[in-house]
Amino acid sequence: MSFPDLASLHALGAAQQPTYPDQGAVDAVVAELTTARPLVFPAECDELTDKLAAVARGESFLLQGGDCAETFAGVTADNTRNKLRVLLQMAVVLTYAASVPVVKLGRLAGQYAKPRSSDNETRDGVTLPAYRGDAVNGFDFTEASRVPDPARLLEVHRTSAATLSMIRAFINGGYADLRQVHTWNTDFVASSPAGQRYEALAHEIDRAMAFMTAIGADPDEFHSVDFHISHEALVLEYEHAMTRIDARSQGHYDLSGHFLWIGERTRQLDKAHVELLSRVRNPIGVKLGPTTSADDALALAAALNPDNVPGRLTFITRFGAGRIREGLPPLVEKVSAAGLQVAWVCDPMHGNTFEASSGYKTRRFDDVIEEVQGFFDVHHQAGTWPGGVHVELTGDDVTECVGGGEELAEVDLGNRYESVCDPRLNRVQSLELAFLVAEMLRRSR
Ligand code: PEP
Ligand code: CO
């Protein structure tokens, strides 16, 4: 079975694709990307598959997080470090407080393309094509900026490479060393109860590390950390061109990221996104929203993981706080009864978005927590493992989601609303989420 070319993928039909005005320009970009440097390596993808297999078996927990939509302008060392830092802090809270290994997966270094519920956006009587992420067009509300430009895909490759190289440098340079648990928190402690709670935990970790060193553990063991990157595989030109044959295994890998997922709007069976990701060997995910039937889930698993390899397939459910307790059980029951090896992960963001009276898209922190609690309860009742969370977050003190310990109100949203797409948890809210999830995890073990 030969690997499908781009034209045959398009022939299957693909939702949410840009309409490029100049096919010649698209072809030139695709040709350039086809020989561009890979961002990740097949062995790293396999390593992540193994880690996700432990999640599927109920031995580890996945923390996947980052922006809804990265932007080219947002690729700065500070921004990347802040996101890495909040993810590391959350992982420490989950690992230590719940005594469970945590698989850390950034929603970054490639998260530039967005599916939209409407093709157009209207402001003050003017209608233009919707913004589809920096991978496709510009956020500015002008006609010129909203025209899809394929050259942006080359910039996706460049900025993803830059982000990943910063992450690798932070990690190899010791920033993620467990002995830095306090450093990640220094600018944070006095100002917030979550920061103080974290500091107390960091002191316990210090003592635990001192104990382990005293009994002969090698302190260098604390030095490095596993971290992988992920994004939604949306624009076919990019994902197809970044797919390469691995010389070792002769298998195909999409080397634009370690883990790719198919979104709620592009998971149609027999269409291009499912076909493409069924043919690569990366670990992959699929978002499952409230319209997913148990049979849909079985059919997706059959198409995407026919050999039932543990760690290969992650189901990322996003029902909404009000629907998860009814919607998720039939899926979990049927998938388990069929003996399918999947990791179950909760995205408590995308089913809980609403528009505040001020016009900002937002989410309530309490709804996010309620959905995660529902997810844990459903899995507890079914005897399955609540394998992780997938969250939109940032390491900065933005004001995009309401609630949390700081009791951010709808009137505060305008203070620092920076997301170009969905609202993200800020640093304090992210850490609070980690503490609450750690308690749920501890109770479920
Ligand atoms: C997203 O993850 O930003 C997204 C668009 O999610 P979903 O496909 O679940 O709607
Ligand atoms: Co989003």
Image (cartoon, rainbow, N blue to C red):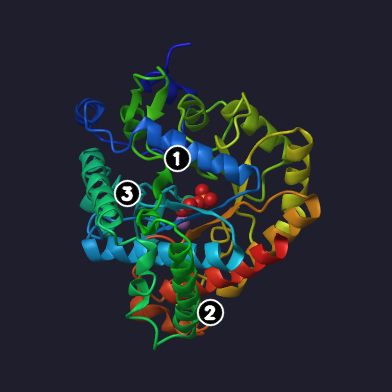
In the rendered view, tell whether residue 193 sits above or below residue 156. Answer: below
Q: Earlier in the sequence, mark 3 or mark 1?
A: 3
Kindly identify the residue that appears in the image at 41 percent across and 46 percent down: 231
Disc marking residue 83: none
Q: CA distance from mark 2 to mark 3?
A: 28 Å
Circle 2 — which element?
Answer: loop
Q: CA distance from mark 1 to mark 2?
A: 30 Å
Q: Is residue 346 visible?
A: no
Q: Position of residue 235 (x, y in %)?
A: 37, 37
Q: Are marks 1 and 2 in contact (CB under 8 Å)?
A: no
Q: Quadrant of residue 299?
A: top right
Q: Which residue position is annotated with label 2? A: 404
Q: Position of residue 127 (x, y in %)?
A: 35, 56
Whether label 2 lies within 8 Å of ligand 2 gets the answer no
Q: Amino acid at mark 2?
A: Gly
Q: Earlier in the sequence, mark 2 or mark 3?
A: 3
Q: Amino acid at mark 1?
A: Leu
Kindly identify the residue that appears in the image at 43 percent across and 12 percent down: 2
Is residue 218 toward the left or the right of residue 284 in the image? left
In the rendered view, tell whether residue 287 sits above or below residue 398. Answer: above
Circle 3 — which element?
Answer: loop
Disc marking residue 260: 1
Name the quadrant of the C terminus. bottom right
Q: Earlier in the sequence, mark 1 or mark 2?
A: 1
In the rendered view, tell whether residue 122 sits above or below residue 60. Answer: below
Q: Is residue 159 visible?
A: yes
Circle 1 — which element?
Answer: strand
Mark 2 neighbour density, 10 Å: few (under 14) some (14–19) many (20 or more):
some
Numbered label tally: 3
Q: Which residue position is annotated with label 3? A: 109
Is residue 208 toward the left or the right of residue 395 in the image? right
